[in-house]
Every structure is written in structure tokens, then in C-alpha cells.
Image: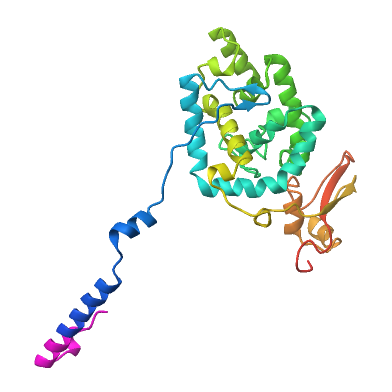
Amino acid sequence: MLIPLKKIAGGVGVVLLAAVLINAVSDTREHAPDKENDTKEEITKIYALQIPDSLSFSGELMPTDDPEVLERIDRELLVNTYWQSNALLLFKRSEKYFPVIEPILKKHGVPDDFKYLAVIESGLQNVTSPAGAKGFWQFMESTAREYGLEVNSNVDERYNLKLATEAACEYLKDAKERLGSWTLAAAAYNAGQSGISNQLERQEASNYYDLLLGAETGRYVFRILAIKEIMSNPDKYGFQFEKSDLYKEVPSYEVKVDTAVKDFVAFSKKFDINYKILKVHNPWLRDTYLNNKSRKVYYIEIPEKGAYLSKR
């Protein structure tokens, strides 16, 4: 504790000050940490990771006996393991969104491993990239329209998880048919089908791991595999959580709409929710109204009553 010197007068003040300083030093020594022991306890230990003997994507083995491949997967495992806050959020979100994605992949015959592609694309969030790609599956506007998603000022189905997953499946099946493997199809999701096809021809290669690619595409499949390995084995990589710590899907039902909606604020109140909650469940609705001159059928998700604590 610091004592203002101007409050201490004369010789008595000097004695008192000396006593205070002695006591302060004594107190510091008494409570000072044992540097040797405390340092050992306080330092966070960072460990090298043991690369699994076998890693595969969609049933296709990674050649981990290749030293160059081994270094690249080691990098991605380290980066994603020790970015703990991000990884823990991925675990939490996956509990909420994988149950939506997995059955759609299965329905289309697309391997379940592709759910991890959505993880590295967006972190399982409706984000927008610097290039303008949007949604969980990061569709550019032209590709979204090519695969049947509606994109305009009223509606952007890139933000509709179910419909965007359907479109992603169609793209991936086309890429697999053209390029010959699911690993190459995954790479094509980043670089485009023509981009990968041209590199295969130019380099006279037939395998992703034999291709020299740009930095982003060169890391792409390795990142997917690292995320798959970590999220499939949380204990192995030091992640501790309970089922109750994870995010849950809010029970909901769908309302069919085939007309214009003049005001979604008023529309939401009919279901005892507010506009914010309506948009949380339907981020693909981009405005407070819907023109729908074509009388297209839309399905709007409404949370079950009681899903949110207070009445809206």
C-alpha cells in the first residue's frame, strides 16, 4: 500500500514510513510465489501432435507416408487444435447444424465427410466472404443460380441451409463425375471444376496430393481432414465439454406461403414471435416484405411455442 508522504510529519513520520516499508516487504516475501514451482504449474504445455497412421476423406486414403503430405497435414492439425476457442465453437455449432446437413448428404449419395467442408467454408455460420460468397456453403451468386437457388433483393436462398445443402450436393456430384474422385471434387469446390481439370491435364496428374496448387486450394483438403480428425476425436485433442454445453436446434415447423407478404413484422406477430426471431430462423428472407409476383411456394420456419422464454 502506498502512503502519501505529505501526511507523514517529522521524525515520527520517518519511523512510521520505515515500518510501513518493512511490513510491505515482509508481506511481499510472505506471499511471493515460489517461482520454480509456480512456473511449472502455470506454464501451458504445448505438445507436438502424433499424426494418425491412417487418414481418409470419403473413403479415399491420404498418403501420409509421403513426407511432404505429412508436413502439410501436421500444420493443419496444429493450427486447428491450438486455436481452441474457434474449435470449441465448431463443436457447439455442429450439434445444432449437422443434423440438418447429414440427411441431405445421405439422400444425395454424397459422403458424410463433406459436412466438414461446410465447417471450413463458413464455420457453420451465414457469413459473407470478401469475394461475395455467402451462406454456410459459400456460394457465389452465379453458381447459386446455376444450381437452382433464388437470389434477389427479397430472397437469397444461399442463406437457406437446407436448400443450399441440396445445391452443394448437386455441385459435388457433378464435380465427382467430371474429375473422378471425391477428393478432387472437394478441391474443385474451392478452385472450380475447370481450375482443377486444367491443372490435372497441365501437370499430367490424376491425384489431388500430386498436384501443385495455389496456397488456398493446396491447403483445402488438408484443412477438411484436420477438422474431421479433431471433431471426431475431441478427447484425443484435449477438448472437454458436456452434451449440455453444445448448442441445440430449436424445435420448429414450416408455414407454406405462396402469395406476397406485405409486412413480415406483422406476419411474425401472428405466430407470437418478433421480427428478429423470424429472421433468425429464416435468414434467406432479405427484406421486411416479399413480392412473390410469380406465386412461388416458400416454406417459412416458425419456432414452436415456448421455444423462447418470453412471449414475443
> Percent position (x, y) of residue 167?
76, 31
Inspect this view and state whether residue 305 appears. Answer: yes
Q: Quadrant of residue 10?
A: bottom left
Name the foreground residue: 265 vs 68.
Answer: 68
Q: For the N terminus, give its image quadrant.
A: bottom left
Q: Quadrant of residue 97?
A: top right
Magenta segment, prevailing SS (helix, strand or loop)? helix
Q: How is the image coloured?
A: rainbow
Give the residue drawn at x 76%, y 47%: 285
Give the residue drawn at x 52%, y 28%: 219
Report if residue 242 lies within the magenta region.
no
Report if residue 10 lies within the magenta region.
yes
Inspect this view and state whether residue 160 appears. Answer: no
Q: Quadrant of residue 303?
A: bottom right
Q: Residue furthest front?
A: 37
Name the foreground residue: 59 vs 219.
Answer: 59
> Percent position (x, y) of residue 65?
51, 20
In this rendering, is residue 118 above or below 256? above
Q: Is residue 126 left or right of residue 67?
A: right
Q: How many discs mark residues in the rendered view?
A: 0
Q: For the C terminus, give its image quadrant.
A: bottom right
Q: Is residue 135 left or right of residue 43?
A: right
Q: Is residue 7 left or right of residue 173?
A: left
Give the residue drawn at x 57%, y 10%: 205
> Percent position (x, y) of residue 28?
26, 73
In this rendering, is residue 239 above or below 27? above
In this rendering, is residue 232 above or below 270? above
- The residue segment tinted magenta is 1-17
> Percent position (x, y) of residue 130?
55, 37
Name the foreground residue: 309 vs 145.
Answer: 309
Q: Is residue 58 left or right of residue 65?
A: right
